[in-house]
Image: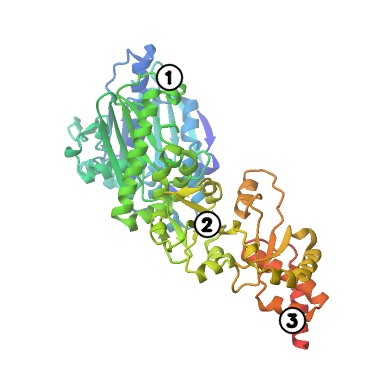
Amino acid sequence: MSKHAFQTEVNQLLNLMIHSLYSNKEIFLRELISNASDALDKLAYLKLTDEKYKSLDLPEKIVISADKEKKLLKISDTGIGMNDEEMVENLGTIAKSGTKSFIESLTGDAKKDSHLIGQFGVGFYSAFMVARKVEVLSRKPLEEKAWKWVSEGDGEYEIEEAQKEGYGTEITLHLREDAEEFLNEWRIKGIVEKYSNHIPFPIYLVNEKGEEEQINKASALWRLPKSELSDEDYKEFYKQISHDSEDPLLWVHTRAEGTLEYYTLFYIPKKAPIDLFRVDYQPGVKLYVKRVFITDEDRELLPTYLRFVRGIIDAEDLPLNVSREMLQENVVLAKIKKQSVKKILGELKKLMEKDRKAYEGFFDEMGKALKEGIYSDFDNRDTLLDLMLFKSSEREGYVSLKEYKERMKEGQEKIYYLMGEEESLLRHSPLLEKYKEEGIEVLLFADEVDAIVMPTVTEYDGTSLENIANVEDEGEVSEETKEKYAKLLAAMKAELGESVKDVRLTARLKESPAVVVFDKNDPDIQMQQILRQMGQEVPTPKPILEINPDHEIFVKLLEKEDEATTRDIAHLVLDEAKMAAGLEVEDVSDFTARLNRLVARAIGA
């Protein structure tokens, strides 16, 4: 017998399970049945593709039995099984990124954390919501040794060599007193019907006479005709494959026949997966060939920007022994992928047109990921642009590019936008003043991904897009005004020195004294941040300070011709303009000192 300590993250998870306030504890059975189904899937694949396993003759099934006297619940399968090393790897540590994301999402507040259980399938460890002790007896096919894993969820587990008649895994739960309801036949049948009806293997319940009674349909739901399925069937199957406690937002069920035969069933969740923006995210689509499970780890089944999609692809025209490398280059899968993307985007477009509120809820959750497709999926770029939603300078809520274009003023030739890090800063940007005065709507691109994606979009439906920060309008300032301010501009530029690339007049400001912009050849603020997050060294480009010649500050400064005041104001308006753009003021104490001097002068005047 060997004793082991659980990984730190597992201990956190077990602590949450044992002290869980989550009311829907019945999901433990869904999770354990799902694991058993995965074990059967893996062995079924080996039976078809590996000569060594083809002679195995145990029926593929999951069996549940209850002992009311001893308060034991057993779930067994004839799947791939585990040896001692695999028990340590699978039951003692957390490997899946999604589980790590789950742990990272924990707040320490028991009530808040209990809700996370429903958002993420916590797998094997959910057994500890109902059990004071868990035993796992397992044996791999073609191996004589069996192994037993035991834990009370107290930070440790034991593994010892054991005896087991056939291959597969048997999990024994020593139920707590408050979980004895799960020993009742009607309760077990209800949970299986609710969550596991369409597990593609038979699930048997041992009744009081000791007989095995099948309690699920054991059908591959995705291969059934739509006419035979209810909305409830689709929703229950989604919860089974996604481990989500909420209903899906929508689903797309397809059967393709002809030169290419395949089945697909895709779901769009209401909430974004916890690991949506992790590099090591877990793909949500499983690949089957002729009902045989192949993989759930292939990120190439759908484009990366659709990584929030959950579902099944079941192909008829692939060899069962297809390798990972073959999957990436397979022509059949490429065609299925292409058609699937069009179907999914088509359904999202229908949702956008029929139920705008539901679509906006989806876009809040998954819109940033969807935007990635604009620069990575050129074939579907037009459709993706139709699906985009943006904030606007003219109204609250979202605006699509199509809606913007329909509202363009007569004579307006471009779609205008402003890019930055925060919507609130963009809404109050001095750069909007001229457009507001003229009643021209400006789209606000405040998502981090916009800095990468939107500069690649030069036009929409024949109308070009333009970033108003890149519009140079010095030409609109009269020659007379330029001449009048030449000396002041030179003095300010000399004072600011290397802090700026240039100081110039602008006609775009109406209320603000100044604004900072960047040369169109330099990365803007948002792009600078992204490049630094990617680990690249980015020299900070110098801003261009544009001043409003009609503003009272500069009108009076011209009249006063006070060098000390000019120096202070040059720095103050630059820092103020930086703050308005979301940039940091480099020397706060200097800013404060200059401001105080100006206030003192104003009081003394």
- Helix, strand or loop at label 1? It is loop
Percent from the top left, x then y, of residue 72? 31, 38
Q: Let me know if residue 591 appears in the view.
A: no
How is this picture coloured?
rainbow
Alpha-carbon neighbours of circle 2 within 10 Å: few (<14), some, or many (≥20)?
many
Q: Quadrant of residue 473?
A: bottom right
Image x and y of residue 184, in percent: 23, 43
Q: Label 3 sits on what residue type?
A: Val
The disc at residue 431 is none
Pointer 2 and pointer 3: residues touching (CB < 8 Å)?
no
Q: Residues within 10 Å of mark 3 (few under 14, many from 20)?
A: few
What x and y, as percent, mark residue 588?
A: 73, 67
Residue designated by label 2: 446
**Front residue (pair 375, 262):** 375
Which residue: 56% across, 59% down?
Answer: 468
Residue 145 numbered mark, or none: 1
Q: Tag 2, which secondary structure?
A: loop
Q: Amino acid at mark 2?
A: Ala
Above-or-below relation of 494 to 130: below
How far separated are the C-alphas under marks 1 and 3?
85 Å
Nearest to N terminus: mark 2 or mark 1: 1
In the picture, measured across the screen, residue 599 lies left or right of residue 33, that is right
Residue 105 location (% of width, % of height): 49, 51
Disc 1 residue type? Lys
The residue at the point 27 percent across, 22 percent down is: 59
N-terminal label among 1 and 3? 1
Q: Quadrant of the C terminus?
A: bottom right
From where the camera sits, is residue 256 visible? yes
Q: Quadrant of residue 603?
A: bottom right
Q: Which mark is residue 599?
A: 3
